[in-house]
């Protein structure tokens, strides 16, 4: 019901080519996340799928139908915006009912659907309020409710959690994932936060300057990044990259190793370094170690590994978790 | 910014403000005072105490009918405002939400037409009105007033519409609203304060317009501006009657302005205070 295929989709704004040409297939029911740094074109891609921007060339198919020239309302999609984009002059009830009103659905059915959506999203007590009287999380739910009642073939989320505080973001992340389990509708989610991408996605599309760097499941991208960009983008804290003489034993110009795959010792190891800043998170400690001939590396230690600024430590990378990259930045497998 | 202002400074500032306000208001005040004098009294000289006679008002109404020009003023102001809104709302929408490279140029060009002295095009316009039979008609004058105030209406609506987040209109589009649906269900309700201020301002501008309303009318469509002008006749100076006619002409708009002053101020300063 919600299979989306993009073929050679190209988007230019005047002389600037934002998306050079993308081929992508999104299967029905998948939770796909577009992730990438600011300005990589992920929001533009979402808007192209929504129909809010026209493609410069290429086709977009939804369930086998070519919708490249179709208006947004005719594509059977629903969108949740970063700023929620609720109608400030309408009550919550009318906000959620608006799409149904535009579709000329009968008032009885509107009443039924709005009540049901409000129940699912815990908004029943807020139906008569205006958006200005709601908290950020509640507004977010109204925006989702407005999308749900349309029963779209796919939901589009444009960085919906960016405006929420950290605690609320965590809760809403779970709620959206739960919603996906419940509705089993295709969801396309745009974010710059790779933690959101890793925790929510069935499939992640990593974008950089309009190009797809890699498509795969979260663990695929974590364990087998195709290139330097994906390796450095996925995983928090960032993967360490080692070049030059220290990388030689591993037979590659550049070698990558994640902070959590380095063993620490105060006695002996492969690389010697001096502890710089230590970030204590309680469960983990992240040490920034200045390693001879290499530079700053980030290493994860358990919370009770007791070192301070200036101490000497020895790092040993786990041989099985080393990533090798050639001089073009592509992974060597 | 909390700054302690001494009571003395506030008193001085308040008195100064009142003095300035009085100076600005004085012409109107003196007009009203003069309208309550008898004719000989009025010509006598500067005198702030009238004899509180209503004879000038009576003469004005019996000699010339006040009601007809009053109705003309109302029809012209309200009519040209509504007509201007019908044209300006879609125009401002397109400039605010789908601007092109030329949009700023078009806005500037529209405003520049207000910089031209009206008298420069008096003859061509008069001839066009004469040849199309629009002279001295309410229709002709409504069209004229609409056109001359249109740049300001479009400009004001444009600045209001720009304040509306484009995402909300996009959400309406995703929800299935047609273009007209967007404007009716989402844009207009959100822009109501802006549209109201613009309407008020345009009614005032149209009510006070004294060039075209005098030049293009004789009897049928003459509004209150022509009514006042008819009292400065070559037969003599009828100060008291003139003042009475003027007071009658500006009273409605003064009252309306008084009651809507908050919206007016907001409307006029909106673009400036950002």
Image (cartoon, rainbow, N blue to C red):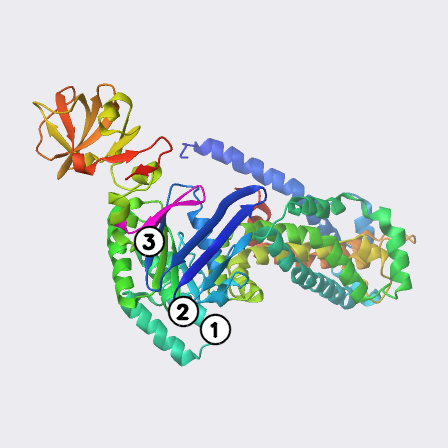
Numbered disc 1: secondary structure: loop
The disc label shown at residue B248, or none: none
Residue A31: x percent and y percent?
32, 58
Q: Is residue A162 visible?
A: no
Q: Is residue B197 left or right of residue B46?
A: left
Earlier-in-chain disc, 1 versus 3: 1
Residue A3: x percent and y percent?
39, 64
**Are the residues flagged by discs 1 and 3 from a single subunit?**
yes
Q: Is residue A123 left or right of residue A42?
A: left
Mark 1 → mark 2, Cα distance in angstroms: 9 Å
Q: Nearer the viewer, residue B85 or B251?
A: B85
Residue carrying label 3: A136
Residue carrying label 2: A150
Residue carrying label 1: A103
* Numbered range of the magenta stretch: A203-218
Q: Above or below — where is B108 with respect to B98?
A: above
Numbered disc 3: secondary structure: helix
| Quarter holding residue A283 | top left
């Amino acid at each position: 019901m919600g299979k989306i295929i993009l073929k050679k989709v190209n988007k230019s704004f005047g002389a600037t080519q934002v998306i050079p040409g993308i081929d992508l297939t999104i299967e029905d029911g998948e939770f796909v996340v577009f992730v990438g740094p600011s300005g990589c074109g992920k929001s533009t891609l979402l808007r192209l799928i929504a129909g809010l921007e026209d493609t410069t060339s290429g086709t977009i198919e939804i369930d086998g139908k070519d919708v490249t020239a179709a208006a947004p309302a005719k594509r059977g999609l629903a969108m949740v915006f970063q700023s929620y984009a609720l109608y400030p002059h309408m009550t919550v009830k009318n906000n959620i009912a608006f799409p149904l009103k535009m579709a000329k659905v009968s008032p009885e059915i509107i009443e039924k659907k709005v009540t049901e959506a409000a129940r699912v999203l815990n908004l029943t007590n807020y139906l008569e309020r205006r958006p200005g009287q709601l908290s950020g999380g509640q507004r977010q739910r109204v925006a989702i409710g407005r999308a749900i009642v349309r029963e779209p073939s796919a939901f589009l989320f444009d960085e919906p959690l960016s405006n929420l505080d950290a605690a609320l973001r965590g809760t809403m992340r779970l709620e959206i994932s739960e919603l996906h389990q419940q509705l089993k509708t295709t969801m396309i989610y745009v974010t710059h936060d790779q933690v959101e991408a890793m925790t929510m996605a069935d499939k992640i599309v990593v974008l950089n300057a309009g190009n797809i760097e890699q498509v795969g499941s979260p663990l695929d991208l974590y364990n087998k990044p195709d290139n330097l960009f994906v390796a450095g983008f996925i995983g928090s804290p960032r993967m360490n990259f080692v070049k030059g003489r220290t990388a030689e034993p591993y037979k590659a110009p550049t070698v990558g190793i994640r902070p959590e795959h380095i063993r620490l010792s105060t006695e002996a190891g492969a690389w010697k370094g001096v502890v710089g800043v230590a970030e204590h998170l309680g469960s983990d400690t992240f040490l920034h170690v200045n390693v001879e001939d290499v530079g700053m590396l980030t290493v994860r230690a358990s919370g009770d590994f007791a070192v301070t600024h200036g101490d000497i430590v020895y790092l040993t990378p786990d041989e099985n978790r080393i990533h090798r990259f050639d001089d073009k930045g592509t992974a060597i497998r | 910014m909390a700054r302690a202002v001494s009571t003395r400074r506030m008193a001085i500032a308040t008195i100064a403000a009142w003095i300035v306000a009085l100076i600005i208001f004085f012409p109107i005040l003196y007009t009203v005072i003069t309208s309550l004098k008898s004719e000989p009294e009025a010509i006598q000289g500067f005198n702030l105490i009238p004899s509180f006679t209503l004879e000038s008002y009576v003469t004005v109404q019996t000699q010339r009918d006040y009601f007809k020009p009053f109705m003309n003023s109302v029809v012209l102001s309200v009519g040209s405002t509504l007509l201007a809104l019908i044209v300006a709302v879609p125009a401002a929408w397109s400039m605010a939400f789908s601007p092109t490279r030329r949009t700023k140029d078009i806005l500037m060009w529209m405003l520049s037409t207000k910089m031209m002295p009206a008298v420069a095009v008096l003859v061509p316009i008069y001839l066009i009105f004469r040849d199309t039979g629009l002279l001295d008609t309410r229709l002709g004058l409504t069209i004229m007033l609409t056109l001359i105030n249109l740049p300001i209406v479009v400009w004001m609506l444009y600045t209001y519409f720009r304040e509306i987040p484009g995402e909300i209109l996009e959400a309406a589009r995703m929800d299935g609203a047609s273009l007209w649906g967007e404007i009716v269900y989402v844009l207009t309700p959100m822009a109501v304060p802006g549209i109201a201020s613009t309407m008020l301002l345009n009614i005032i501008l149209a009510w006070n317009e004294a060039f075209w309303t005098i030049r293009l009318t004789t009897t049928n469509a003459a509004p209150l501006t022509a009514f006042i002008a008819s009292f400065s006749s070559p037969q003599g100076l009828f100060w008291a009657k003139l003042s009475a006619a003027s007071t009658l002409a500006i009273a409605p708009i003064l009252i309306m302005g008084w009651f809507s002053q908050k919206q007016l101020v907001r409307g006029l300063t909106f673009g400036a205070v950002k």
